[in-house]
Amino acid sequence: MNNIKELTQEAPSNFQYVSSIKMPEEKKDTVGESAFTQRMIRKSGLVLAAGIVAGVLFIANDTGSVYEYNEEVQQAVDTRVSETLSVGTVIAEKDDGYIGADYDVTLSTDEEETTIQIWDYASEDGDYVQILADDQAVSEPFMLTNKPVTYTVPADGEIKIVGIRDGGDGITYGIYYESDGFIVYNGVEQGGTNTYTFTKE
């Protein structure tokens, strides 16, 4: 305590103890909010706006391809297959109610298994599917997005895409077979099934 006394006694003349300093009263505006509250509200609004912009940009960059019309896309729309478009290509701006078909697929492989990639080829509107291989679940029901997801399936047998939930105007998806190198742009009703019968060459 003596040390503290000595220090305070030797303090410069313009020195004041914190306890003796009067804090200025915050200015009030006409509706009774303090200047501090107004500053916080303004800053919160800026932070919220920046967060929304960042979220939108993240989603836009993370969801895969963006629809771009060209001759190859039109051919894929007409034939529902493509050997030239990239995996994940979006061929429609919105679901077109297309209900597809079953396919027999001959795979060029000696392997027991192959991989498939599947995505929503139109707008991401909450379509859900499930993948079965010989009536055994390969996946849980999942939402289709424009970003392809990959599953390993047998290279012989039946692969089924089951329509679990229609987000609106039909469940649309692209499916790519790694061992064969082509894409089918297909569609299925809620509660319906597309069957792909795989046979090794």
Image (cartoon, rainbow, N blue to C red):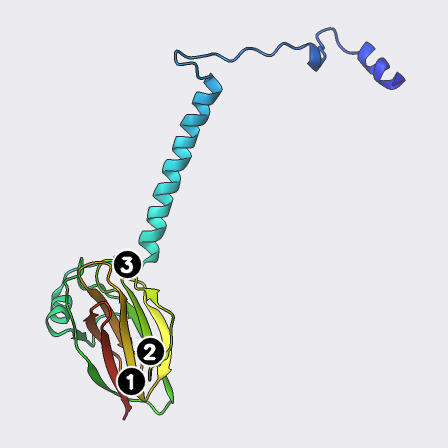
Residue 6 vs 93, above or below: the answer is above
Identity, as a three-letter code, of the amino acid under mark 2? Leu
Residue 57 x, y percent position in the rendering: 34, 48
Q: Secondary structure at mark 1?
A: strand
Q: Confirm or deny contact between disc 2 and disc 1 (CB under 8 A).
A: yes
In the foreground, 87 or 126: 126
Q: Secondary structure at mark 2?
A: strand
The quarter of the displayed image where residue 144 is located: bottom left
Q: Confirm or deny contact between disc 1 and disc 3 (CB under 8 A).
A: no
Residue 38 x, y percent position in the rendering: 43, 21
- The reply, left or right, for residue 185 in relation to residue 24 is left
Q: Which residue is mark 3?
A: 126
Query: Which one is earlier in the sequence, the residue at label 3 or at label 2?
Result: 3
Residue 102 x, y percent position in the rendering: 19, 80
Residue 129 vs 15, above or below: the answer is below
Q: Residues within 10 Å of mark 3 (few under 14, many from 20)?
A: some
Q: Which residue is mark 2?
A: 132
The quarter of the displayed image where residue 64 is located: bottom left
Q: Residues within 10 Å of mark 2 (few under 14, many from 20)?
A: some
